[in-house]
Amino acid sequence: MKWPSHCGASASSRTARPSTSTSAPARSPASSACWARARPNWPAACSAPNPSRRAPSNSTAGTSHPAGADAIRAGIHLVPEDRHADALVPGWSLAQNISLPFLKSFSRLGLVNTAKEDALGRDTIDALGVVTRDEHSTVEELSGGNQQKVVVGRWLAETPRVLILDEPFRGVDIGARRDIGRRARALAAEGAAVLVLSADVDEVLEVADRVVVLAAGEIHLDAYGEDAERDRVIQTISASV
């Protein structure tokens, strides 16, 4: 079946309530990316990091524009679709990549507390089961699945009120997929709103307790629990084409 590639940017009217892991199946990989990026106040991962590793005095590091910093301060975190283009910083260690958006929390007088940063790296390794030599390994040394865990771990370094994961399982193995899904569900159980955008219906059903199908900016299905059956989700998507 060929899914339409239209981006439903006006779907921003949909909300996720606390203690709920919500997923929105996209009709194509391009759809979910457009949907997530249509919101200017959601944080983007660092695309032009400060090579000096000095924490800025009046902004949040790890964002591409001031609106991203505002979103982080509000507790809204986004795991972007393309980890290589929009998240990971080549040549930096696992710990440095994770701490990037929150350098002010790891710094004093503009200098990074590397011991505290390394501790965060070790905590992420333990929490998400990252397979690596240690927190000093560069991200290039990691497998695709473990790189994705680092990106997810970055946005869990400070507990978010809202976590948006854009195609979080793409290019990762089944073990990494389960680890990420487990952490997302645990975060929702702690009271956060978790939104997963995915083009894979099975991924959506595995991680979410609420499924929303969007087409052309309109909600065609909003189902909880047993009502979110695979056949029903697929039929709704097909009918919306």
Image (cartoon, grey):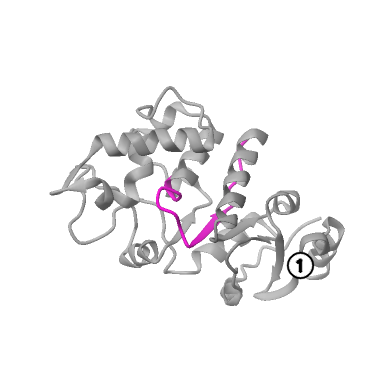
User: Residue reaching furthest front?
Assistant: 190
Left or right of residue 210, residue 39 in this image: left
Regarding residue 64, the answer to whether it shows in the image is yes
Q: Is residue 17 above or below residue 135?
A: below
Reply yes or no: does residue 100 show up in magenta.
Answer: no
**Residues rendered magenta in the picture:** 154-172
Q: How crowded is mark 1: few (under 14 residues within 10 Å), some or many (20 or more)?
A: some
Q: Position of residue 31 (x, y in %)?
A: 62, 62
The residue singled out by tag 1 in the image is 223
Q: Is residue 14 above or below residue 101?
A: below
Say what secondary structure mark 1 lies in: strand
Q: Is residue 156 above or below residue 160?
A: above
Residue drawn at 20 percent across, 54 percent down:
56
Label the magenta part by its dominant secondary structure: loop
Q: Which of the pair 166/72 is nearer the observer?
A: 72
Q: Position of residue 22 (x, y in %)?
A: 65, 61
- Quadrant location of the C terminus in the rendered image: bottom right
